[in-house]
Amino acid sequence: MNTSTLKRGLIVLSAFSALAFSTAYAPSAQAQAKEVVIAYQDMVVPWRYAQATGEVERATGYKVTYRKLGSGADVIRALASGSVQLGEAGSSPIAAGLSQGVDLSLFWILDNINDAEALVARDGSGVTSVKQLTGKKVGVTFVSTSHFHTLVALQSAGVNPSDVKIVNLRPPEIAAAWERGDIDATYVWDPVLAKAKKNGKVLITSGEVAKATGKATFDGFVADRKFATANKEFLDRFVKVLAATDASYRDHPQTWAVGSPQVAAVAKESGANAADVPASLALYAFPTAAQQASNVWLGGGKQSGAAKSLAATAAFLKEQGTIQAVLPDYSVGVDPQFAQRAAAR
């Protein structure tokens, strides 16, 4: 993969019912007149249930439009253009967006990726280790967390990324290329990861990469900073929805079984096979509001876990030539106040 290709990729970037929330949090008449567009991806995460059941609308009173986008880079680009106000993105596109001056703030950790992203070699490719990817074609989504960990994994294995044919594909395109046999390997997340595993070998997971290198990845919710400042009450209520769905799964995972309304909703919104959803959810870790408010994730300014992860990611991306500059402090893009208020309730 050459630097100019990566630069071009970055240039493109420029459980529950309404009773779960008491009437104490009923939206105001003024809020009912407001609207928000939320960008999401195909990740298999608990809050898809709230998304599918209209819980955000009930909890906030806002008219919510959901827009499904193909990658975190697409989400950051949409935020920068003003076409969406909130969106899901991985730590790599968030770091790249902040480095390029996108006025966004990370206000919630959607998930700690752990083993939910993995590098898989297709059966018949002859690849059984990361070292054997030299000269092979690997499909990844540019500027994603999996792209970042692809580069880290190759470097750690002593493989020069320029000696690997890394092609930029969004998850649906990866699935199609995998079925056709056009690529030898992919670094991707569910639901495409589940499909790749059926006729492929996992070479390494993001959890293993993070443990070996200290370069962890996560998915987060980001907001246009001006929107976040002007709509704090909305974000407080939205974060309560996110925290409640995560807690529902985290505290009672056995109820999120195949055939349950939760799994059906997650499958519908993400495009996953319902039979794969429970195993996919188990690959992630979903931090509590208290954990998010602490310096493990969003709290602590420059020393917060999120800020340090974004800084390390940005430094690596600059080293690879994918961004031009690194910020002195990535906590400028981290906003812990909503998680802190959720944890205090």
Image: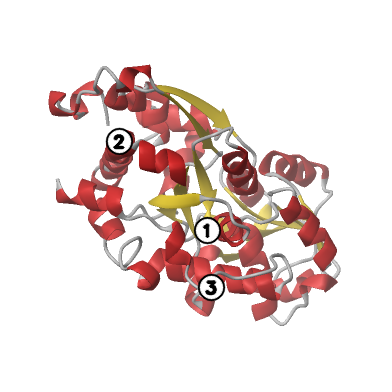
For the N terminus, which image quadrant?
bottom right
**What crowding class fits label 2: few (fewer than 14 Cα within 10 Å), some (14-19), or many (20 or more)?**
many
Q: Is residue 184 left or right of residue 247?
A: right
Could you tell me if the residues under marks 2 and 1 are in contact, i.e. CB atoms within 8 Å? no
Residue at x 66%, y 60% (from the top left corner): 147
Residue position marked by numbered label 3 in the rendering = 312
Residue 195 appears in the rendering = yes
Q: Quadrant of the C terminus?
A: top left
Residue at image mark 1: 91
Give the image quarter of residue 61.
top left
Three-letter amino acid code of the residue under disc 2: Val
Q: CA distance from mark 2 to mark 1?
A: 22 Å
Local SS, label 1 = helix
Task: Tell me if residue 288 can be seen.
Answer: no
Q: Where is residue 293 drawn, in percent x and y?
A: 27, 58
**Mark 1 Cα within 10 Å, few/some/many (few <14, many 20+)?**
many
Residue 72 % position (x, y) = 59, 47
Please give the residue where the numbered disc 2 appears in the rendered image: 241
Amino acid beneath label 1: Ser
Is the C-beta separation of discs 1 and 3 under 8 Å? no
